[in-house]
Amino acid sequence: MTRQIDHLPPAALLQQQAEWLAAARARLLRGVGIAHRRRILDLGAGYGAVTGELVRRGGGLVAALDREVTAVSQISVAPGVCGDARVLPFANESFDLVFCQCVLLWVGDVVTPPALHGVAGAVSEIYRVLQPGGVLVALEPDYGGMIEYPPEVASRDLWLAALRRAGAEPLIGRRLPGLLTHQGFQVQTRLLDEVAPPSPLRFEFLRTLPLTDEETAVLHHIEQSTITPQLVHLPFMLVTAVR
């Protein structure tokens, strides 16, 4: 059975995720001249793990949007707005920079009402609220491309099954550039090029997803593995898309 996750992971986990991606995010934001951007949207801001960074580095106003009102209401560094990425509550051409990180992953097509059109609907809305010359900066994973070694520690199948069960699109990384190009964006895509030592916190993220009893047992077995060294790499698509 498929269902949409109706809550965010704990704020501490989201903060850790933001730290993992900090270097890549900094390069992307510097590359689009964030200091000269005057109206910035933090799309899917959650508890504001990146909002403060956008405020510090940006050259103007920042708005933080998330569909979880209990999360966005805790953001103090910028105005918080409760809303859906597929129906953005902003006028046309309101922003010159839209930022999102591990957000479009959760705007999947699996359980989306037809009128909203899932990720394609969100891409259309981002295009609408960007000014001509405005840019989307997106960091999105592709769980189908996970690299894990040795095989005894592989959790890729658990991620794919649990994410789809939760209503996410685990292959959003490979889908996103084509969706953006089809919408009319000029797209540049890079890959996260750093392979960091695997963090056990990745399993804390996995536990926030709906796992079956069998999958939970498999996860426990993987966690107990003492095989070393281990290599675990989740590909991230680092996308800049100009309207």
Image (cartoon, helix red, strand yellow):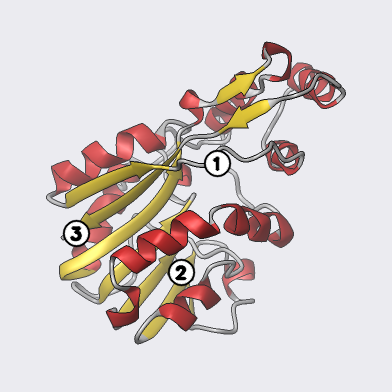
Image coordinates of residue 132 in percent, x first then y, are 12, 69
Decide which of 47, 133 is in the foreground and name it. 133
Of labels 2 and 3, the one closer to you:
3
Q: Secondary structure at mark 1?
A: loop
Kindly report the distance in space between the C-alpha atoms of the residues bearing marks 2 and 1: 19 Å
**Marks 2 & 3, CB-CB < 8 Å contact:** no
Which quarter of the rendered picture does the C terminus lie within? Answer: bottom left
Give the labeled residue for mark 1. Answer: 4
Give the labeled residue for mark 3. Answer: 242
Depicted 169 relative to depicted 153: above or below = below
Precedes in sequence: disc 2 or disc 1: 1
The numbered disc on residue 65 is 2
Which quadrant of the figure has residue 5? top right
Depicted 119 relative to depicted 126: above or below = above
Are there few (<14), some (14-19), or many (20+) residues within 10 Å of tag 2? many
Q: Secondary structure at mark 2?
A: strand
Decide which of 235, 144 is in the foreground and name it. 235
Image coordinates of residue 90 in percent, x first then y, are 30, 73
Image coordinates of residue 227 in percent, x first then y, are 81, 19
Decide which of 198, 184 is in the foreground and name it. 198
Precedes in sequence: disc 2 or disc 3: 2
